[in-house]
Amino acid sequence: MRRLFSILLIFICFTAVLPLRAQHKDSARVAVTARARQHSILLRWGMSTSRAWKLGNQYGFQLTRYTVTRDGKLLPTPEVKVLNTQPLRPKPLNEWEKIVQQDQYAAIIAQALYGKDFEVSGGGGGDKGIASIMAQSAEQEQRFSLSLYAADNSFEAAVMAGWGWEDKDARPNEKYLYRVKSLAPPDRVTVDSGSVFIGIQDYAPLPVPGDVGAVFGDKQVALSWDYSILKHYYTSWIVERSKDGGKTFEPARSLPVTNLNEKEGRPSTRMYFIDSLEDNNTVYQFRVRGISAFGEKGPPSAATTGKGRHVLIYVPNIRSNKISAQGKMTLTWDFEAAGNPFIKGFALNQAATENGPYKTVLANIAPDQRSLQYEQLLPSNYFTITAVAKEGESTTSFPVLVQPVDSIPPVPPVGLAGTVDSNGVVTLTWKANAEKDMLGYKVFRAGRLNEELSPLVDSIHMTTVYKDTVPIKFLNRKVYYAVAALDKRYNQSDYSAILELKRPDVIPPTSPVFTAYKVTDGQVQLSWVNSGDEDVAAHLLYRKDRADTSHKWLLLQTFRDKTHYYADQLIEGGQTYTYILMAKDSSGLESPPTQPITVTVPSDPNAISVKTVNAYVNREQRYIELSWKDSNVGVNEYQLYKGAGGQPLSLWKVVPANVKMVVDESLKINTAYEYGVRAVDKNGQSGPLKKVKTNY
């Protein structure tokens, strides 16, 4: 039996991947795996060291089942049951005879368990072969390793060896913790038991291998498929092929294949397999099936189809290139005439960089042609010549650089725009040039419109956004920018359109100056000289009433023109008022206020006056009724004033002398209103303003 399987064993010795074997040889333990079926649960286990494996086979194993959940509920105390009445050991040698005749993996396990020696050789090498050296130095390690590999491919043989169990009494509504314990004496070896938690409800069909690819060459094919996703389901693989259009498939190799690339810290993601083909004319189909740790064959993948291809051994080589004064290129190349019958012709490929991407710009060039002319040149060109094979892979020459003379600069950049923030940081943007040979840009600045522009950078600026900083406390209020484009031959364009930017304004305007005032006809008449700064946007006149306990400044008027006179009519006799004036520029900065002017309005004993003013609020019908009383004779009219939300009073209505009540319906809720009433006699003399406040 040993000699019958010697060649098989040496192959497995170099290719086996043992999922139940521990990574560290010094730790003795039982490794357990399980798989749920529709009506039972399969269990497999193995030892982590060859010594523990040998003693485990001698003394056997105990399998205990703990029922943990039932009907989705955790049991208060797990139900314990030892599944084996006798220690699980390898069956006697005579019981292996029948299975060995049908299962080559059972033969490997039987040889590892009962063979007098475990010499592995390829034959013909005597004692000097690598297999002989391995057999002499690590016979027990070989028995251990190869038996575990064989058990991965035959569950029936694993059960015969006492390393597997099928729990047919498992119920669908329960989940179990299975514990496998080595019965080897602790004084001979200490072995940690192993366990696994599973239930029939965890059953799922084995997955279909995916992403199977094939690269067909000359009488061979290289297959690859996704390994990383399925390595927890399958320990080895079967590659099947068909030559009759997929009607029948047969294994491409007599043995399963395993992953040789899996290394600790560097896991592989794909599995690879190379197969030879009988010829390049037959159409083959290949598919892949996985084998689980229980020897189950999974469903096949989708088939990939192809046939071998002849390899073109002739490669073109570009010999020379010349560019005429008109910008036309003449390209010549070498290609052995013996290769002409094997190609459809040539193709010219062009790219802007050596690494591509290359684009075919001329195709269907005759097989016997060795030169061509081409005009569509870029500023920098890389060309290759491809010999287009009739079968198999085409061949391509090395790239060559072709550069025509270029003295034409790019067009000036457009869309130059910019902003200046309060810290003097300038952000410039513009549209990118469309020339294919663009290299970058240069940015220029000037302090005056007609001043010569100076470059801001010594090197080439590569983007269309540029940051600059200008001093904010500067005599010039404006700064000017321009941008020029450069191509890869350093041809510089003209300037872009000049961009004018205003520096941030941090200096307030100068203050205006009051020049005169007088009180006449019930008015305070003010005159002043406006601020002389160019960017003044408005002048603001404020008044404060000494009788007003809040002492707040009231904005009387905003002047946005060159006005320098104002008559304040909203005054009362016997009151004292203070006035100030400020200038505001276009940036919102305000000047210091003028020197205040304080005016006392004298009382006129002959002036007609309003005695009382009342404001009645009707919120249901949404109006305010304003009424007043006086005992004056000779009243011609009443002037009514109104202010809302703290704003100054302004003339609202003029009513005849016989009207002493008005209704205001132009109201907003949650707003404070102030009203004023002034009597005017037939001579145009006005009395003091009587005020009243209310909330609506």
Image (cartoon, helix red, strand yellow):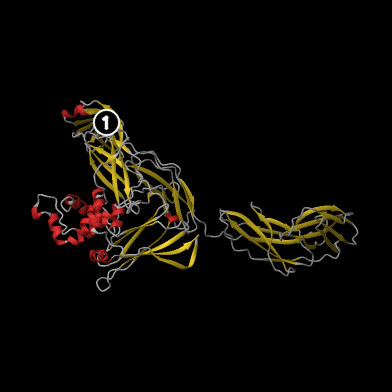
Of the pair 76 and 211, the residue shown nearer to us: 76
- The picture places residue 146, in percent across and down from the top left corner, at 23, 56
Decide if residue 538 is on the left or right side of residue 89. right
Decide if residue 425 is on the left or right side of residue 540. left
Q: With respect to residue 135, does 219 lie above or below?
A: above
Of the pair 44 and 347, the residue shown nearer to us: 44
Query: For the residue labelled by badge 1, is the local secondary structure a helix, a strand or a loop?
Result: strand
- The picture places residue 239, in percent across and down from the top left corner, at 28, 43
Q: How many marks?
A: 1
Quarter of the picture containing the C terminus is bottom right
Residue closest to the far bottom: 187
The amino acid beneath tag 1 is Ala
Q: With respect to residue 40, does 277 lie above or below?
A: above
- The picture places residue 235, in percent across and down from the top left corner, at 30, 52
Q: Quadrant of residue 569?
A: bottom right
The residue that label 1 is drawn on is: 347
Q: With respect to residue 211, does 91 lie above or below?
A: below
Residue drawn at x 14%, y 55% is 131
Residue drawn at x 26%, y 74% is 187
* Residue 122 in sight: yes
- The picture places residue 72, in percent across and down from the top left corner, at 50, 60
Residue closest to the far front: 94
